[in-house]
Amino acid sequence: MLNIVLFGPPGAGKGTQSEKLISKYGLTHLSTGDLFRKHLGEGTDLGNLAKKYMNEGHLVPDEVVIGMVEDKINSTISSKGFIFDGFPRTTAQAEALDTMLEKNGMKISGMIALDVPELVLKERIKERGKTSGRVDDQDEEKINTRIKVYLAETFPVAEYYEKQGKLQKINGVGEIEEIFSLISNVVDSY
Ligand code: AMP
């Protein structure tokens, strides 16, 4: 079973590369951002709770995210494996994920971290904001907050996997296909 954490700052290309990984390896996409946006669109209690954090570029509280991920894993447990995209975003989430997987006799195969300079991220997010309809893609201040939150709260998650010998860094600037080929090489080595 392949369970991959695709990691990187907002705008690193995690969503784009996840789609390609899913179709090549037949995995289940578990994007917490997408799940929250679905709840938001459907106006559920969870969506309403997450909304104020998301729209400001802040993280949704750990217990809310962890509960949502647990439900998704339990409802797709027969999957060949998962691509975790945008999760875990804190060390507490990473620990909770390990516990959840262990309970089901599963584990993380590895983390693939996309490395993209801050200037490029900002350009990409602004460009995406023209068509994504995402409130958090459209405002310079919110984009800056998301990058700051990433550096302060999410970046340490890479160290968590590095300590387990599971971190692989990839250059996330270049052609989509080139980057995908680098990622595929890592996945094939698992
Ligand atoms: P994303 O689509 O991954 O950029 O996520 C959009 C927004 O959803 C983030 O800015 C957070 O507000 C929220 N979110 C997504 N995933 C998480 C997570 N793992 N932990 C906390 N908040 C999250």
Image: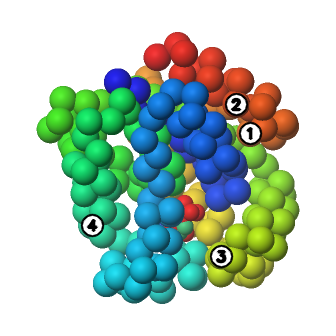
Which disc, if any, is residue 151? none
**Mark 4 in CB contact with mark 2 (< 8 angstroms):** no
Marked residue nearer the N-terminal end (3 or 2): 3
Of all residues shown, which one is farthest toward the left? Answer: 103
Callout 2: helix, strand or loop? helix
Marked residue nearer the N-terminal end (4 or 3): 4
**Which residue in the protein does label 3 denote?**
134
Q: Is residue 84 above or below residue 152?
A: above
- Give the total of numbered labels: 4
**Which residue in the protein does label 2 denote?**
180
Number of other residues with Cα within 10 Å of mark 4, as a class: few under 14, some 14 to 19, many 20 or more: few
Q: Mark 3 vs mark 1: give the one in front.
A: 3
Asked if the beta carbon under badge 2 is closer than 8 A to the nearest atom of ligand 1, the reply is no
Which amino acid is tagged 2?
Phe
Which amino acid is tagged 4?
Glu
Marked residue nearer the N-terminal end (4 or 1): 4
Percent position of residue 142, x then y: 67, 78
Which disc, if any, is residue 172? 1
Which amino acid is tagged 3?
Arg
Which amino acid is tagged 1?
Gly
**Which residue in the protein does label 4 denote?**
63
Callout 4: helix, strand or loop? helix
